């Protein structure tokens, strides 16, 4: 589970991340920004729009992304703001596919050390 202190919740934090670097994967677009100095721990936020599917599908995709991102959170540098935007293709992807897409995006953004093996 992703701890509450590790979640991007404020609009200003989403804006900072979206103004930063980005990488597009199979079903995801990954945005990375740097938080203001008081922030220490990395944070992750998710954008899953209506184009992905019904509320049930969107929530399923969001839960899967939270689980995948939580496993990679410890390897992210401090003050990192990571925003993962799901594209409509994400609705048909398994958790393993989402993890691979996230890892590829993190590698493209120079955060390849954050890519870790999935839990057994």
Image (cartoon, rainbow, N blue to C red):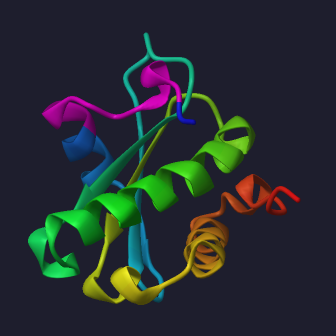
Q: Residue furthest left?
A: 50
Q: Position of residue 3 (x, y in %)?
A: 52, 25
Magenta stretch in the rendered image: 3-13
In the image, residue 94 above or below residue 55: below
Residue 21 visible, this angle = no
Q: Residue 104: name its quadrant.
A: bottom right
Q: Quadrant of the C terminus?
A: bottom right
Q: Tell me if 92 is positioned left or right of 116 in this view.
A: left
Q: Position of residue 102 (x, y in %)?
A: 57, 69
Q: Tell me if 94 is positioned left or right of 35 in this view.
A: right
Q: Quadrant of the N terminus?
A: top right
Is 34 or 88 nearer to us in this picture? 88
Q: Residue at x 74, y 42 (%)?
A: 75
Q: Tell me if 23 is positioned left or right of 76 in this view.
A: left
In the image, residue 30 above or below residue 1: below
Q: Position of residue 96 (x, y in %)?
A: 66, 76
Q: Residue at x 35, y 81 (%)?
A: 91
Q: Residue 59: name its quadrant.
A: bottom left
Residue 48 visible, this angle = yes
Q: Residue at x 20, y 29 (%)?
A: 10
Q: Is residue 102 magenta?
A: no
Is 40 or 25 nearer to us in this picture? 25
Q: Residue furthest front?
A: 56
Is 9 or 96 nearer to us in this picture? 96
Q: Tell me if 29 is positioned left or right of 10 in this view.
A: right
């Amino acid at each position: 589970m992703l701890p509450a202190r590790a979640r991007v919740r404020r609009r200003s934090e989403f804006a900072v991340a979206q103004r930063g670097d980005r990488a597009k994967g199979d079903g995801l677009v990954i945005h990375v920004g740097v938080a203001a100095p008081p922030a220490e721990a990395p944070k992750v936020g998710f954008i899953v729009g209506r184009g992905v599917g019904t509320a049930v599908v969107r929530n399923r995709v969001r839960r899967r992304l939270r689980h995948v991102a939580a496993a990679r959170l410890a390897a992210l540098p401090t003050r990192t703001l990571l925003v993962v935007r799901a594209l409509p293709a994400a609705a048909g992807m398994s958790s393993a596919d989402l993890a691979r897409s996230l890892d590829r995006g993190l590698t493209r953004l120079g955060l390849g050390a954050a890519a870790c093996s999935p839990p057994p």
